Each structure stands twice: as C-alpha cells, then as structure tokens.
C-alpha cells in the first residue's frame, strides 16, 4: 500500500522547477510527474491499453497519452523535452531525499 507521498512530492517538485518557464505542456508535465514511478507497470507489464483507456475516460487527448508513453520510456535516462528534463530533475531530487530543495 502507498500513501502517494512520492507522487505528491514529484508533482510539487516539478511544479516548482517549472515555475516561470513558458511553452510547457502543463498536462504532459503533470501526467509525467504522476506516472514517473510507474513506467514499468504502465509500459512493460501489459497495462498500457488499460492506462490509455483510463486516461481517455478522463478526457486526456490521445496525443497527450502518446507523448506520455514516449516520455516515460526516456525521461529517466535520456530526457529530450523540457517536460522530461523537469520531471527528471524532480525525481532525482526526490531520490536524494532533497524534498524541500526544488
């Protein structure tokens, strides 16, 4: 069981790091932060279609869901977009235990 503290910390850190930056996809940034610890479950364990259905039922555009899956596959090791770089840094800070730094 989880208390979702890791998700809250990732979202909060990503929001702080992104503060003042323009041209970001806020929806993608939020979703990437939320799912940042779940990339194996979402993409490698056969749950991708369930995740697509769930996000679609919430009104998330298919284009954003596709971008999320691309980002999940690379943000941790090879971030390519500003959103991926922000979440990469947020997750790294969380792993270091640096909760209040970002």
Image (tube, grey):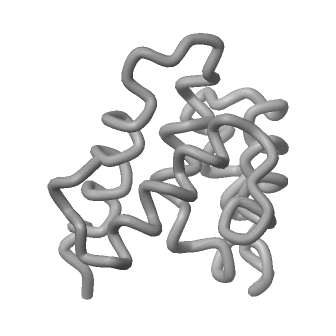
Closer to the camera in the image, 90 or 60: 90
Tally of numbered discs = 0
Q: What residue is rendered at 56% in x and 11% in y? A: 22
Q: Hey, which residue is sitting farthest front in the picture?
A: 101
**28 left or right of 34 in image:** right
Q: Position of residue 17 (x, y in %)?
A: 40, 37
Q: Residue at x 58, y 50 (%)?
A: 32
Q: Is residue 35 above or below residue 56?
A: below
Left or right of 16 in this view: 67: right
Taking the spot 18% from the left edge, 74% from the top edge, the residue there is 3
Occupied quadrant, residue 86: top right
Seen in the image, is 5 located left or right of residue 59?
left
Q: Position of residue 8 (x, y in %)?
A: 26, 55
Q: 33 or 84: which is nearer to us?
A: 84
The residue located at (74%, 71%) in the rendering is 77
Residue 52 image point, x, y percent? 73, 52
Q: Which part of the image, by quadrant, shows the N terminus?
A: bottom left
Quadrant position of residue 31 = top right
Vertical placement of residue 60 versus 71, above or below: above
In the displayed structure image, the side of residue 92 where residue 99 appears, left or right: left
Residue 28 location (% of width, % of height): 62, 35
């Amino acid at each position: 069981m989880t208390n979702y503290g890791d998700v809250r910390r990732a979202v909060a850190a990503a929001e702080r790091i992104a503060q003042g930056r323009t041209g970001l996809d806020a929806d993608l940034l939020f979703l990437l932060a939320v799912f940042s610890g779940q990339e194996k479950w979402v993409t490698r364990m056969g749950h991708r279609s369930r995740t697509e259905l769930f996000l679609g039922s919430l009104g998330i555009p298919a284009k954003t869901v596709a971008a999320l899956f691309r980002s999940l596959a690379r943000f941790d090791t090879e971030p390519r977009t500003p959103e991926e770089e922000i979440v990469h840094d947020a997750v790294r800070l969380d792993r270091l235990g640096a909760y209040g730094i970002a």
